[in-house]
Amino acid sequence: MNSPIKNISLQARWKALAPREQNLILAAGTVVALALLWWLALAPALNTLRTAPARHAALDAQLQRMQNLQAEALQLQAAPRSAPGDSVASLRGSLTQRLGATAQLSLVGDRATVTLKGAPADALAQWLAQARSNALAVPVEARLTRSPAAAAPAPATHLGSTPAAAAPRWDGSLVLALPAR
């Protein structure tokens, strides 16, 4: 390509334009250059500055969750190792205390199977946390379905006569791995 010829041709066309047309072309070129500068340099930087506090807060929350999990793991590691009989006794005691007659425990080797019939969800969650921390039992399998048996009716609210929603109950089984002997 003949760049010197094209350059001379463009200069000739530029000189042939009226000063008003030259000013309009320069203004249009300036607008295009400013738009490119905005889209490629300034807008992404401003967007980063705008979203930085929310991202920082989310990362702080994630860091806090990870530190809590680390503290829990360190606490579990530092806990004295209990004998398998102690783990089983702890499981039985907490199961009876938290879930009562809605749960039954059966042991096979290093696995404990808990069968649930109409167990309240909040009591089950509390028992699982207690079983993990006290008996060092880890859930490995859960087959739960919402119990068709309705929970005890909730008391009426002060504002109206309609009762609040009944707490969910669960049927099914949980398999827990007991600590190694």
Image (cartoon, rainbow, N blue to C red):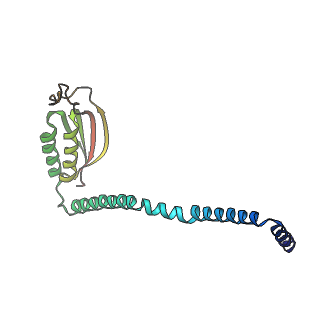
> Residue 124 sits in which quadrant?
top left
In terms of depth relative to the viewer, which is nearer, 1 or 34? 34
Q: Position of residue 120 (x, y in %)?
A: 20, 35
Quadrant placement of the C terminus? bottom left
> Residue 20 sits in which quadrant?
bottom right
Q: Is residue 106 visible?
A: no
- Residue in the image at 56% along x and 66% along y: 41
> Residue 118 sits in which quadrant?
top left
In terms of depth relative to the viewer, which is nearer, 23 or 2? 23
Q: Is residue 145 visible?
A: yes
Above or below 104: residue 10: below
Above or below 5: residue 96: above
- Residue in the image at 17% along x and 50% along y: 87
Q: Position of residue 18 (x, y in %)?
A: 79, 65
Q: Position of residue 134 (x, y in %)?
A: 17, 52
Does 25 sit left or right of 134 as displayed? right
Above or below 21: residue 105: above
In terms of depth relative to the viewer, which is nearer, 43 or 57? 43
Does 171 sit left or right of 18 as displayed? left
Above or below 41: residue 87: above
- Residue in the image at 81% along x and 65% along y: 17
Does 9 sit left or right of 160 as displayed? right
Quadrant placement of the N terminus? bottom right
Q: Position of residue 45 (x, y in %)?
A: 50, 65
Q: How many marks?
A: 0
